[in-house]
Image: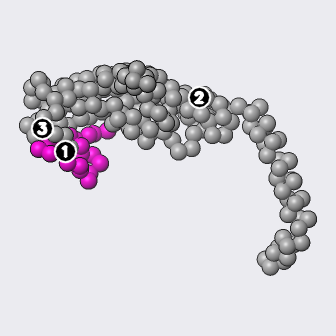
Amino acid sequence: MRAKILLQLKPLQQFSIPFTGLKIGKHQFDFEIDNSFFDAFEYSLVKEGQLKVDVELDKQETMLILMIHVAGTIKLDCDKCLAVFDSPLDVTERQIVKFAEDDLESDDLEIIMLNKKESSIDISEILYELITVSVPYIKICEQNGIDAKCDSEMIERLENLSSPSQQQEEKTTSDDPRWEALRKLK
């Protein structure tokens, strides 16, 4: 069990940015996200993807300002035809990290409070949340923008499977005299 936990943490260790030895000013960091990143999160909406992350860290006396840009493709399941398709992702976000004596929590979602004793910041959870929030609520191949079309054979199968049950349901409701009495109320 312990080896599995270490294996899951290892892909995320590369997303830790040491800021203690950095001079005040702007610094660039580049990361690559692949399937091992998403495997480290147990119930991830996204299972596969190839993303490039550019982080500009602006170190100041009392805080860090992170400008995060994530671009690439993620694999999603189409809600209409159930096919797997590549969805483009291009997101930019600003994250502010303030230093405090104690581990305080901020009410502002854009601000992370970090203890002054910390020497690095782990941005793996920030990246995971940024990617997950960017996943569309309704995922359809045709709305993807790339030359992707829904699988017409699968849609036809799904319609055929759903049609008999609707007819059977209508037959069942028409046989019941209580439903007829309710329809008369309209």
Mark 3 and mark 1: span between their CA atoms?
9 Å
Residue located beneath label 1 in the image:
103
Q: As drawn, is 171 to the left or to the right of 25? A: right
Q: CA distance from mark 2 to mark 3?
A: 44 Å
For residue 63, which quarter of the picture? top left
What secondary structure is marked by label 2?
strand
Q: Quadrant of residue 67?
A: top left
Q: Nearer the viewer, mark 2 or mark 3?
A: 3
Quadrant where the image shows the N terminus: top left
Residue 86's label in the rendered image is: none
Which amino acid, mark 2?
Phe
Disc 2 and disc 3 in contact, CB within 8 angstroms: no
Sequence-first tag of 2 and 3:
2
Q: Which mark is residue 85?
A: 2
Percent across and percent down for residue 100 are 13, 44
Q: Which residues are magenta?
A: 92-112
Callout 2 crowding tier (Cα within 10 Å): few <14, some 14–19, many ≥20? many
Q: Is residue 26 visible?
A: no
Q: Which badge, 3 or 1, comes first in the chain's sequence?
A: 1
**Disc on res. 116:** 3
Q: Residue at x 29, y 48 (%)?
A: 109
